[in-house]
């Protein structure tokens, strides 16, 4: 949990964050100013999340990425200049990110996240993991749970994107508005139609609430053939099952996402894995239509902006302890062009 009691907002910070302080309050801004965040993977989604968190005014943000800037990054990665192709992606993104807010301590780490132990993650209050395969996400999530570190995961595949959050056990406050019962005034024997009509008064109270979360591994081990979950399949969005297909695609091919340059080959592999994955899950293969599989190529900037905006918003909500967080998946469905929140593992 991010503590804010020892953090003081300077006059310069109060001026810079004036609009935010008016929106979510001084205590919430203090918590943000105390937060240390690590973003793994500086692709399109990592850029959007990093930009939003730096602008919100966290204390420290570290970029972790061992990848090299390539020509494809120009379609989604706006922090690395075009003349930095061939250099490390985290270091190339550092200058532009720092310029967004000089009051935030922004640093880069060029190692692969797989080389990071629990000691590294213990430096932070919150981890956002992108561009990682399923095994690495589960490993980092497990380390975060052991150290009580807030964990987020996400990625973008073409027109489709997802985010996942595990806050372990989270306390937050929510404003609840209710009507106030008014005393009736004695107006004699007047008919009801002639009685003076008044608008009902309302009052807003701050209510403390708590929420428990499941780990990523627990959500992926759900038995969809069980009576409890089999009933949910029909009414569920296909996005969760599509994510399972993409995780298997990464495991079998070693690629981070389907390639536009090898579209026919990768599309055939996706169809094959779709049939096998859904069969193993006891889910009808019609749940993930062929139309969806054709929308998963490359990493698109507009989708990164949508998913990154939602993910960063959830991070800010969790740090500030304001309002109910998503529990536990957010998906962007490219066919419906809408976001979907699914709660899996309960």
Image (cartoon, rainbow, N blue to C red):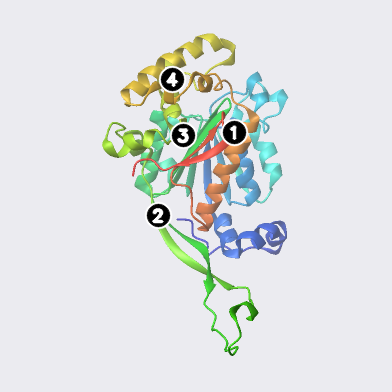
Precedes in sequence: disc 2 or disc 4:
2
Q: Is residue 3 above or below residue 343?
A: below
Precedes in sequence: disc 3 or disc 4:
3
Label of residue 237 in the image: 3
Any part of residue 86 in sight:
no
Secondary structure of the residue carrying tag 4 is: helix
Residue 109 location (% of width, % of height): 54, 35
Q: Is residue 260 above or below residue 16?
A: above
Please tell me which residue is depicted at 42% across the width and 34% down the height of the picture.
137
Asked which quadrant contains residue 346, the reply is top left
Precedes in sequence: disc 2 or disc 1:
2
- Label 1 Cα neighbours within 10 Å, binned few <14 / some 14-19 / many ≥20: few
Q: Which residue is mark 2?
A: 211
- Label 3 Cα neighbours within 10 Å, binned few <14 / some 14-19 / many ≥20: some
Looking at the image, the residue that sits furthest to the left is 226
Q: Which residue is mark 4?
A: 249
Precedes in sequence: disc 1 or disc 4:
4
Q: Is residue 194 left or right of residue 135?
A: right
Residue 229 location (% of width, % of height): 32, 37
């Amino acid at each position: 949990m991010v503590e804010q009691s020892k953090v003081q907002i300077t006059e310069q910070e109060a001026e810079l964050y004036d609009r935010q302080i008016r929106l979510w309050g001084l205590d919430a801004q203090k918590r943000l100013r105390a937060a240390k965040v690590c973003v793994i993977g500086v692709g399109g989604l990592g850029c959007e999340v990093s930009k939003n968190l730096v602008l919100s005014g966290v204390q420290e943000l570290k970029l972790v990425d061992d990848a090299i800037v390539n020509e494809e990054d120009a379609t989604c990665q706006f922090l690395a200049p075009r003349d930095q192709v061939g250099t490390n992606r985290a270091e190339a993104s550092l200058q532009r990110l720092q310029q967004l807010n000089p009051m935030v301590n922004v640093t880069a780490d060029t190692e692969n996240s797989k080389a990071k132990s629990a000691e590294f993650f213990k430096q932070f209050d919150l981890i956002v993991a992108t561009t990682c395969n399923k095994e690495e996400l589960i490993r980092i999530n497990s380390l975060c749970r052991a150290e009580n570190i807030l964990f987020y995961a996400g990625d973008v595949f073409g027109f489709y994107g997802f985010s996942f959050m595990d806050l372990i056990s989270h306390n937050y406050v929510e404003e609840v508005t209710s009507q106030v019962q008014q005393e009736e005034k004695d107006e004699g024997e007047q008919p009801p139609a002639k009685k003076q009509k008044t608008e009902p008064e309302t009052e807003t109270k701050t209510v403390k609430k708590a929420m428990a979360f499941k780990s990523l591994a627990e959500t992926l081990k759900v038995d969809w053939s069980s009576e409890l979950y089999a009933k949910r399949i029909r009414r569920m969005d296909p996005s969760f099952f599509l994510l399972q297909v993409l995780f298997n695609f990464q495991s079998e091919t070693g690629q981070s996402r389907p390639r536009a340059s090898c579209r026919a080959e990768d599309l055939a592999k996706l169809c094959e894995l779709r049939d096998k994955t859904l069969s193993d899950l006891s889910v009808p293969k019609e749940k993930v239509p062929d139309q969806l599989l054709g929308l998963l190529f490359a990493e698109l900037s507009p989708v990164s902006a949508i998913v990154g905006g939602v993910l960063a918003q959830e991070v800010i909500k969790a740090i500030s302890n304001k309002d109910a967080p998503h529990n536990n998946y957010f998906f962007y469905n490219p066919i419906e062009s809408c976001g979907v929140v699914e709660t899996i593992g309960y």
